Amino acid sequence: MILAGDIGGTKTVLALFAKNNQGTLQCEFEQTFASNDYPQFDDILTIFIKSDTTIDAACLGIAGPIVDQRCQTTNLPWIIDARELSAKFGTKKVKLLNDLEAMAIGMLNSPAEDLLELNPQAQIKTGNIAVIAAGTGLGQAVLYWDGQQHQPIATEGGHCDFAPQTLQQDRFLCYLRKKFNGHVSWERVLSGDGFGYLYDFLLDIGFGPACLAVPTANDVSSYAGDRNAIISRLGINHEDPLCVEAVRLFAELYAAEAGNLALKCLSTGGVYIGGGIGPKIRSALENEKFLSAFTNKGRFKNLLSQMSIKLSLNPNTPLIGAANYFSD
C-alpha cells in the first residue's frame, strides 16, 4: 500500500494506491482536506489512516523547499520530516518531494488526453522539460534529460524577482513594490492572489469602473467567497471589462515567465503547465496572444516558437507523481 500526498497551501489531498493484478497502480481511497483547518499535518494523518492500514511506502509532494528530507511549508505553519514519518509507518520507503517534482513525475505518467498542446507549431523533441504551475503559489521545476530518462529537479524559481516587459507591467511593479515594501516575486503575480492584485491595480490607474460583483479589497475579510475566483471567472467569461483585462494581463505574464523558465533550463523537450489556475483560464492560454508573449524573447524567438507547451488538465497530477515514485 502506497500513501501518496499532494500538500498545498489551500488543500491537502491524500490517497492510498495499490497495484492490481495487471501490475497497474490503482487508487483505493482518496480524501481532500482544507489545509488551514489543521494546526499540524499529523492531525490529517490521524484522520486519514485507519488503525488497520499498513503503509508500505509513502511519498508526499509538498508546496515548500525540501532540505535534508524535511520541509517547513511555505504557506502553512507545518513542519514535515521524512524520518518521523518513517518511524510512524515502520518503513524506510518514505520520500518528500517538492510539489512541482511530484507534478513533473505525474505529467510523465499522464495519458495523452490529460495534456493539451498550446503551440500548434510545436516540434516534439527530446530534452529537458520545464514545469511551471500557478495555484495558491507559483511552483517551478525541471525535468532534466540524462540521455535515457527524465530526472526531476526542484526549484524555488517562483520567488525570483518579477520582471516587467511593458509600460503597463512597469506600472504594476511599482504598484506592488509599495504593497510589499520593495521586493516583488513572480509568485505575488502568478498565483490566485495575483488576480486580486491585478484587478486592484487596474482600478487604481483608472482602467475602468469597479465591478459590483467583485468585493472591494477592504471587504475581503468579511466575505465568505473567493474574490480572486470571481475576478477570473468574470474575466474569462467576458462579463466585466476590468476583470477581462486582469485575466488578459495574468495570461500575458504567465506566458512570459514560462518562456523565461524554458530559456533557463533550455527545455527543448517542451514546457508543462500545471496547477489549478491553468485549466480554469484555458481559453486565455489557448489565445494566440499567450503564445506571442511566450516567444517574445528577442534572438531566441525562433527557438521558443518551435517548443511544445502542454497544459495539464488533470488536477491529480501531483498525486499521480507521488504514487509512481515507489511504484517500481
Image: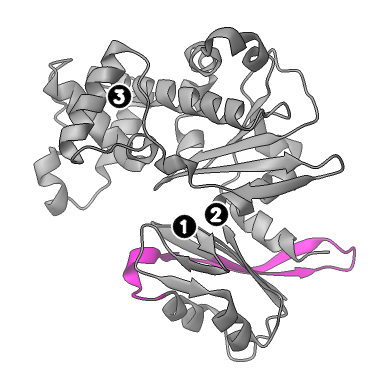
Q: Which residue is labeled 3 in the image?
A: 246
Q: Sequence order check: which comes first, mark 1 or mark 3?
A: 1
Is 316 colored magenta in this rendering? no
Would residue 104 be found to the left or right of residue 257 on screen? right
Is the residue 193 above or below the residue 317 in the image? above
Mark 1–mark 3 distance (CA, rounded to whole Å) = 27 Å
Q: Residue furthest left?
A: 218
Mark 2–mark 3 distance (CA, rounded to whole Å) = 27 Å
Residue in view at x 61 percent, y 67 percent:
15
Is the residue 135 above or below the residue 42 in the image? above
Q: Could you tell me which secondary element the residue under label 2 belongs to?
A: helix
For label 3, the crowd category at 10 Å Cα-Cα, with few meaning under 14, some 14 to 19 and many 20 or more, is many
- Quadrant in the picture for the N terminus: bottom right
Mark 3: amino acid: Ala
Q: Which residue is labeled 2 in the image?
A: 99
Would residue 250 be found to the left or right of residue 108 on screen? left
Q: Could you tell me which secondary element the residue under label 1 belongs to?
A: loop
Residue in view at x 67 percent, y 14 percent:
303
Is the residue 210 above or below the residue 325 in the image? above
Asked whether disc 2 touches disc 1, contact meaning CB atoms under 8 Å apart, the reply is yes
